[in-house]
Image (cartoon, helix red, strand yellow):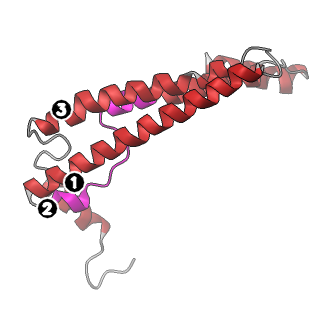
Amino acid sequence: MMVIIIATQVFTRYVLGFTYSWSEELARMCFVWITLLGFSLAAKQRQHLRVVAFITFLPKNIRRIIEIIGVVTTLVIAFALTQKIIYIMQVQIYRGQLTAAMRIPVWIMYLAGPFGFIGMIIRVIQCQLIPLLRNEEIFIKDRKEEIKKEIAKAVPEEGEGV
């Protein structure tokens, strides 16, 4: 939908010489919703940004502790952001602020935040915290050799120029 809106906006602006007043606003709302709802999917698939090269080489028990700290930190931040977005929504509802072109309540765009972060919290608990508490390795499943090869490719050997 967002691609169609943007393509129509570009076509009408550059070919027909006019623009729809609502198209950029709707595309922005679609982008916000897609991005924030994507947090939950990324958490389910464990696709959030992580640097694992260092912890890969740590002993299994220390690695597990670091992974638990990382997951708990993610949950705390997601919960705090959920609370903050809900507060912002309450302010928008109280003020009755409307979007400029479409004249719809601004809080509707902010509503994506709680959905995205609550979904993320549920998925992090389901796909990361519970397996860790069951003593399952969820991030690094014997990838040491693979990571060593990747590091060796990235770091030039002595005598090689950069």
Decide if residue 161 is on the left or right side of residue 8: left
Residue assigned mark 3: 130
Which label lies toward us, 2 or 1? 1
Cα separation between marks 2 and 3 = 22 Å
- Residue 129 vs residue 141, the one in the foreground: 129
Q: Residue at x 63, y 31 (%)?
A: 88
- Residue 89 vs residue 51, the one in the foreground: 89
The quarter of the picture where the N terminus appears is top right
Kind of residue sitting beneath label 1: Ile
Boundaries of the magenta span: 38-57
Residue assigned mark 2: 58
Decide if residue 140 is on the left or right side of residue 48: left
The quadrant holding residue 103 is: top right
Q: Residue 121, how many percent across, how many down?
A: 35, 30
Q: Residue 157, how many percent across, how many down?
A: 25, 78
Q: Residue 58, how many percent across, how many down?
A: 14, 61
Q: Which of the numbered marks, if any, corresponds to residue 66?
A: 1
Q: Determine if the magenta segment contains residue 4.
A: no
1 or 3: tag closer to the N-terminus: 1
Name above or below for residue 73 compared with residue 51: above
Name above or below for residue 39 compared with residue 2: below
The quadrant holding residue 15 is: top right
Callouts 2 and 1 close, C-beta under 8 Å: yes
